[in-house]
Amino acid sequence: MTELCDFDAVELRRRIGTKEISPVELLESCIQRTEDVDGAVNAMVTRCYDRARAEAKIAERRVLQGEDLGVLHGLPVGIKDLEATEGVRTTSGSKLLADHVPEEDQLSVANTRAEGAIVIGKTNTPEFGTGANTRNLVFGVTGNPFDSAKTCGGSSGGSAVALATGMAPLASGSDFGGSLRTPAGFCGVAGFRPSPGIVPSEKRPVGLSPFSVLGSMGRTISDAALLLSAQVSIDPRDPFSVDLDPALLDPLTPADLGSVRAAISADLGNAPMSAAYRDIFKARSGMFRNVFADAEDRDPDFTDVHTCFEVLRGVTYVAAHGERVRNHRNDISPNVVDNVDRGLKYNLEDVAQAHLDQTRIARDWLALFDEVDVVICPAASVSPFAHANWSVSEIDGQQMDTYMRWLAITYMPTMATACGAVLPCGVDDQGMPFGIQVLGPPGADRHVLEVARALEIVLAANPETARPVPDLAKLIKTT
């Protein structure tokens, strides 16, 4: 029988508003599911049940008294352990912050709670969000709900797993080189990477870098859009914070795909991609490309993107974590050390060239959308791998130049400051979730969400492309 925690967030919020269900019983359903399955996957690493229960009772009373309710009223939410939460431990997956308890919520969390969301706990992340395998030296590894010996992706892996297993109907994420999109694809859920500044990030160490953004995750695109509507605001502490698009606050409506022009690309021109995933993407895109006004095979121009990404990411890591690595090298995970060490090897000329290349890439990306409306590509280059490995070292015998190279299918759009949604598209040849990206230019957030929602409806109607669901009984037995 379907439990309350298994319903989509939009439906749950409707039922709370009509008094069909209580925030108290919804929270208890999510808590029970967390207790039942988290021993097998390790996603909800810090829990705040007592506070959540107190807030759920208040939320229930407000419904019964007919008060004005926020868009997330009574909905449990998992918060990624990179985001500061007042009174709730926030470690960023680092031994250096293992006992850190913030005195206030950061803005993204405060906005979410102001709209009625109830924080049930913190979701696991690699240290400082570094890497696409959710594994750290504080809480250990988070397993994929479809095979707990494999990675769930990262760095928003705990959030993706919590959603896939019903621990919470909504969860927050963040994304630099694919930190939100990769785990969404690997776990069969939906996620949205907004344009820079849409969700202000006043805590970002390097404020003038547009590449790291806060975003939303849910089991459906509509759910991710619902959470985004609560996260968005304006804050001058984030230099990229812009005038708010009021359409992002409205309930999501699907686009008319018959008027949408789509570029279909298996590798965005030069991202490493396994032969198996090329074949799967070709087959799956062949099942839905006819719904668009036009769907052409077309690759964006991402010339020199790999070096550009590695240099600019290295600069960011030296700024944000250089002192930590210098003073606490043996207590920091290898991916963080790698990024800092790599960044320190570049010289001023390398950095200058990377800025020139990134500018050209971003302008070429914008020009592409004079001719197409969205770009559709895979969300990952390989099937989820064993989480005992920190990363992917080779694809089909080709050695990856860096531990990040296998993530090019997601970090390339980051260099163009793209916005993008990930949605499930069935399972791959290993029986693991297969996801696709719907990408657009910066500022096209609402349109990308509308196209992704319309495509999600198409995919859901076909058993081969519908959202997969993990075997919860197997996880409970493992626990």
Image (spheres, rainbow, N blue to C red):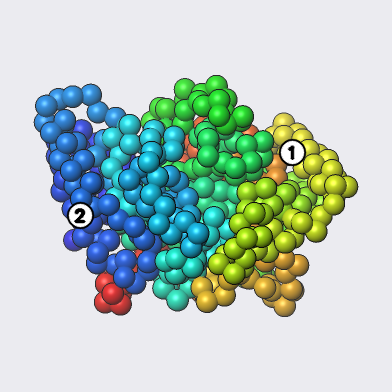
> Could you say which quadrant of the image residue 227 lies in?
top left
Residue 430 in percent (x, y) is at 51, 74
Image location of residue 28, percent across then percent down: 18, 53
Q: Amino acid at mark 1?
A: Ala
What SS does tag 1 mark?
Answer: helix
On the image, which quarter does residue 179 sit in? bottom right
Would residue 47 appear left or right of 243 to someone viewing this image?
A: left
Residue 357 in the figure: left or right of residue 103: right
Q: Which residue is mark 1?
A: 362
The reply, left or right, for residue 202 in relation to residue 364 is left
Residue 272, label in figure: none
Looking at the picture, how far across and down is residue 277, in whole percent?
61, 66
- For disc 2, the marked residue is 29
Give the left or right position of residue 434, taking residue 31 as reference.
right
Residue 232 shows up from this direction: yes
Q: Residue 437, can we see it?
A: no
Q: Quadrant of the N terminus?
A: bottom left
For mark 2, give the secondary structure: helix
Q: Is residue 331 above or below residue 10?
A: below
Near mark 1 (Cα within 10 A), the count class, few <14, some 14-19 or many ≥20, is many
In terms of depth relative to the viewer, which is nearer, 215 or 47?
47
Name the residue rendered at 28%, 42% in the picture. 118
Residue at 37% from the left image edge and 68% from the top image edge: 41
Say which label, 2 or 1, has the lower sequence index.
2
Of all residues, the one furthest to the front in this rendering is: 327
Q: CA distance from mark 2 to mark 1?
A: 45 Å
Residue in the image at 27% along x and 61% along y: 34
What amino acid is found at the position of numbered circle 2 in the picture? Ser
For the C terminus, the quadrant is bottom left
Relative height, residue 183 to residue 249 (above, below): below
Judged from this view, the residue extending furthest toward the right is 349
Q: Residue at x 74, y 55 (%)?
A: 343
